Amino acid sequence: MTDFAAIAPLLEGQAIELPSWAFGNSGTRFKVFGTPGTPRSVEEKIADAAQVHQYTGLAPSVALHIPWDLVDDYAKLREYAAEKGVSLGTVNSNTFQDDDYKFGALTHVDEKIRQKAIDHHFECIDVMDATGSQDLKIWLADGSNYPGQADIRGRQDRLADSLAKIYDRIGDDQRLVLEYKFFEPAFYHTDVPDWGTSYAQVSALGDKAMVCLDTGHHAPGTNIEFIVMQLLRLGKLGSFDFNSRFYADDDLIVGSADPFQLFRIIFEVVRGGGYGPANPDGTSPVAFMLDQCHNVEDKIPGQMRSVLNVQEMTARALLVDRDALSAAQAAGDVLGAHQVFMDAFYTDVRADLAAWREERGLPADPMKAYAASGYQAEIEAARVGGTQMSWT
Ligand code: LRH
Ligand code: MN
Ligand code: MN
């Protein structure tokens, strides 16, 4: 069994990007519950995200969603974030809340509407230029509800054309990542439903286009780690949107519903060379991001719990004795190989991680330290009045 001291250096520099929208109010179609202290501006969302990083050392950047995070001056926002100790990360486009996009955005049959959606992505790239962000993340609500409603082939062709136009604007140090989702809000067909479609589309674009895997966007029972393996094998896994789900796209705290699945996913990232600092050839490792909403729990501790869960499962995945595993696999030792794998998964690394944190000047228990800091009471008192920001 590999011991913690051997893997501790590999935990250095782990970065998990936080979504700005996790700090706003969110809910279901039944009810959005307001939470005291919820940010009223993009700046307040960034300030809250910075708290997560301050106590965990794991979350140095914040993803933006445009237009939810619309501001006049992104260079200024970048400076503000830097003052708080974080940077601005992935820019997410949004073509799912405008009446014009009722029948699609990048796939729309009407050229004017399709161009409007393309132009929105150009604006997102302008934001990236000002913020210094690396990734443009595209998730599309495009799809149809009834068989026969749409020409599904024509839509795929228009999507390829729209993406090519957007990709043309992507800078040398930037990437386009295309997220897939098997259903919702469209229920019959979705234009980018699976990793294969995303892979086909981004492969046609070029090296700076990659697939984004959102863990909540698969049918129940899907072997997600297999997809991770395949995309890494093909050199096309760009990023993760991490979250947990029980039923559909639940957006719960990553590692809460099925920590073993998270362990298996991260093991394949490590095994596939996707984990760690930038590769010597300059290529990025797989970007880790959360895509979650905290409907009933406090948002800052919710994000803290999430990044700590990712760190914990990363440590356990790194503990897998790969030599022993390979030997058992080669020998056809089914249960021996399985045991090597499970030994790492069942290793409780919490005390070691607490000590690791303290050695780095971080609190041993970030959740407790945050609770004791008084920040929550401060924002609850300070942020009365104004409009709390919500997911939409
Ligand atoms: C779609 C999605 C996508 C959006 C986010 C708010 O379900 O996962 O990543 O940008 O939710
Ligand atoms: Mn997502
Ligand atoms: Mn989602």
Image (spheres, rainbow, N blue to C red):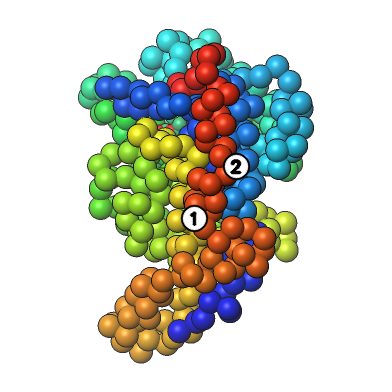
Which corner quadrant holds the N terminus?
bottom left
Q: What residue type is disc 2 on? A: Gln
- Residue under the image location 37 percent in, 78 percent down: 343
- Residue under the image location 71 percent in, 42 percent down: 85
Which residue position is annotated with label 2? 51
- Residue under the image location 50 percent in, 21 percent down: 389
Residue 308 numbered mark, or none: 1
Left/right of residue 19 with respect to residue 341 in the rendered view:
right
* Residue situated in front as seen by the camera: 356 or 259: 356
Left/right of residue 362 with respect to residue 353 in the rendered view:
right
Alpha-carbon span between mark 2 and mark 1 = 14 Å
Image location of residue 241, percent across then percent down: 47, 44
Visible residue check, residue 158: no
Visible residue check, residue 96: yes
Image location of residue 41, percent across then percent down: 59, 22
Local secondary structure at mark 2: helix
Left/right of residue 175 with respect to residue 150 in the rendered view:
right
Is tag 2's residue or tag 1's residue first in the polypeptide sequence? Answer: 2
